[in-house]
Amino acid sequence: MVIRHLYTALFGILMLLSSFTVSAETDVLVGNATYKLSSGDIIRVTVYGEPDLSIEQTRLTDAGTFSYPFVGEVKAQGRTAAELERLLSNALQGGFLVEPRVSVSVLEYREFYISGEVKQPGGYKYQPGLNLRRAIALAGGLTERASTRRITIVRDIDPERKPVKVALDEAVRPGDTINIAQGFF
C-alpha cells in the first residue's frame, strides 16, 4: 500500500516536471519563430539523411543570401527559420529528393552596435535576453559625461530607421543601434 502511494507521488512529480520542460521549450520556440533573419546571421542547414546537402555553418551576405547546393543563391533576408525550411524543402522536393526534412537553426545572431558615451563603442555579439544595462556593461560602462535619460535605439527591423527613446531595462535585439547621449550637468 505504501509503495503504491510512493509510485503515485513519484508519477505526479514527474508529470509536473515534464510540464515545466514543455512550457520552457515552447517559450523558446515562440521567440525563435518570430525572429527574422538578416545579413550577418550565421545559420546551420541540416537535411536529414543527406549530409552532402547539409551546411554546418554559413554567414548570410550583406544582401541576406547564402549559396546552397543544387539551388543556388537563396534569399534568407526577412524570413524566419521555419519559412526558410519550407523554401528549401520545396526547392529540393521532386527534382532531388522525395520528402526532404530540412532544419534551419541560427547559430549566431548578427551584432548590435552601441555608440556615444560608453567607454568602448562598437559592435558586439548579440546574446538572447540582452537588455540595455547589459549592453552598456559589454561596452565597458558609461563615461562620466553619459546621460541615463537620453538613450535612443534605432531598431534594425524599423524601415524608417527612426530613433526611439528608451529606458535602461529595454530589450536589445540583433542589429539594433544604440546611442548614449551626453548629460548636461
Image (cartoon, rainbow, N blue to C red):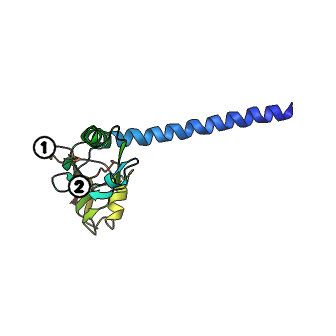
Amino acid on which disc 2 is placed: Leu
Question: Which amino acid type corresponds to the residue marked 1 in the rendered image?
Answer: Glu
Label 1, label 2: how many angstroms apart (C-alpha)? 23 Å
Res 36 visible: yes
What residue sits 35% from the left and 37% below the top? 99
- Taking depth in this image into account, of 42 and 115 the one nearest to the observer is 42
Which residue corresponds to mark 2?
A: 60
In the displayed structure, 117 sits above or below 3; it is below
Q: Is residue 149 left or right of residue 103?
A: left
The label on residue 160 is 1
Residue 72 at x, y = what percent? Answer: 19, 51
The answer to whether residue 99 is left or right of residue 145 is: right
Quadrant of image for the C terminus: bottom left
Image coordinates for residue 94, horizontal then vertical, percent: 27, 37
Is 111 on the left-hand or right-hand side of 158? right
The answer to whether residue 108 shows anywhere in this view is no
Res. 104 mark: none
Crowding at label 1, few (<14), some or many (≥20) Cα neighbours within 10 Å? few
| Mark 2 Cα-neighbour bin, 10 Å: few <14, some 14–19, many ≥20 | many
**Total numbered labels:** 2
- For the point 44% across and 39% down, the residue is 27
Query: Which element carries disc 2, helix, strand or loop?
Result: loop
Left or right: where 156 falls relative to 86: left
Kind of element beneath mark 1? loop
Q: Position of residue 18 (x, y in %)?
A: 59, 38
